[in-house]
Image: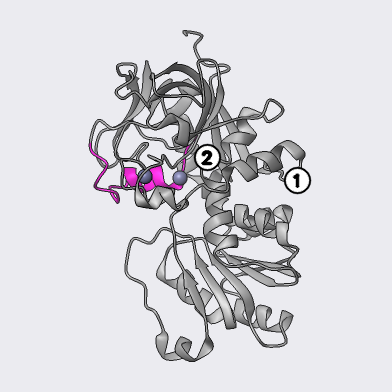
Amino acid sequence: MKALVYQGPGQFSWTDVPRPELQDPRDAVVRVDAVTICGTDLHILGGDVPEVTAGRILGHEAVGTVVEVGPAVTGVSVGSRVLVSCISACGRCPYCRIGSYGQCLGGGGWILGHLIDGTQAEYVRVPFADMSLHLVPDSVSDVDALMLADIVPTAYEVGVLNGHVKPGDVVAVVGTGPVGLAAITTAQFFSPAHIVAIDIATSRLQAAKTFGADVTVLSSDKPEAVVAGLTDGLGADVVIEAVGVPESFELCTRLVRAGGHVANVGVHGSPVPLHLETLWIKNVTLTTGLVDTTSTPTLLGMLRTGQLDVSQFVTHQFPLSNMEEAYDVFSRAGETGALKVVLTRAGASADA
Ligand SMILES: [Zn+2]
Ligand SMILES: [Zn+2]
């Protein structure tokens, strides 16, 4: 089969590899019908994630069809249409027993396209299939379900839920890439009074408006003053960080009101100053996190009922065999306007 194989920093190719086989009774093998590329994959290609070794198939998001199951798998069967989540879960370790699947100690967590071969391939082996796969409702399309593999539950759990967004809140979202836009989308479940989108790029702020932000401001245009103007000078009730650089995190701590929440979603690669000399007196709650995907069943249900619309995330679609071109378009998002780039089996070579 073909797969996107990482060959060291800056090097990858769509190339022939052996088709994956069951290795454990709890495994399933899934034929990939739709797959996408994450900003994290670009970090890996940049050499920022040294645990990923040369020869690894990348990708941690997919929708597909189960083609093989181990004898211990009971929740899915051959032919099941499934969402392959970015988080796998053993279901038995102390963290899994409290729903913290992202912290799984039993061989799960974020492993696909990281510690084991991932989803940017014609087939993928998924460990702990009963816990790691989600059945996709018939009425939900592959491409819509695919948005629930990572970005939507990540933004919802780590941003909106950790930030305790409540009705009437003023929510500021710093960074309006795909995850920031997903935070804007899911914050609306709670009827906030205002959603303020903040970014360095005007084009991204335009996208934020179409996703539901009612106020947009460039980070160079005094967002503190804009938020103060909306809140009688108090500051935002919830600030969601969706960039992952020191400047954006520090901005969040200046935007939050006393007693408010700063929910960090961004993936940080370097140390960030924490200004406790100004924050200590403000009763501020700071949260961090890796997604657990405990919200995924709820979000799939909301796709089915039409309460969640993710159709705007997908800006580019390619056949699976155009993986290298898709990487190129996604990595130049500033020029191409790419949000989520989706590759589907339809239109790919017809070998089964
Ligand atoms: Zn991801
Ligand atoms: Zn576990």
- Between 133 and 2, which is closer to the camera in this rendering? 133
Left or right relative to 151: residue 68? left
Q: Confirm or reject: label 2 Cβ below 8 Å from ligand 1.
A: yes
Q: Around disc 1, counting alpha carbons within 10 Å, would you say few (fewer than 14), some (14 to 19), or many (20 or more)? A: few
> Where is mark 1, residue-wise?
307
> Where is mark 2, residue-wise?
149
Residue 235 shown in magenta: no
At 41% across and 90% down in the image, what residue appears?
A: 277
Rendered location of residue 340, percent (x, y): 56, 41
User: What amino acid is labelled 1 in the image?
Assistant: Gln
Position of the N terminus, as image quadrant, is top left
Left or right relative to 17: residue 99? right
Residue 241, compared with residue 310, is above or below; it is below
Q: For the residues marked 2 and 1, what is the alpha-carbon distance in whole angstroms?
A: 18 Å
User: What amino acid is labelled 2 in the image?
Assistant: Ala
Rendered location of residue 324, percent (x, y): 42, 29
Colouring used for the render: one colour
**Magenta residue span:** 36-53
Quarter where residue 169 is shown: bottom right
Residue 101, compared with residue 120, is above or below; it is below
- Between 24 and 311, which is closer to the camera in this rendering? 24
- Between 222 and 4, which is closer to the camera in this rendering? 4
The answer to whether any part of residue 222 appears in the image is no
- Between 78 and 178, which is closer to the camera in this rendering? 78
Q: Secondary structure at mark 1?
A: loop
Q: Closer to the N terminus: mark 2 or mark 1?
A: 2
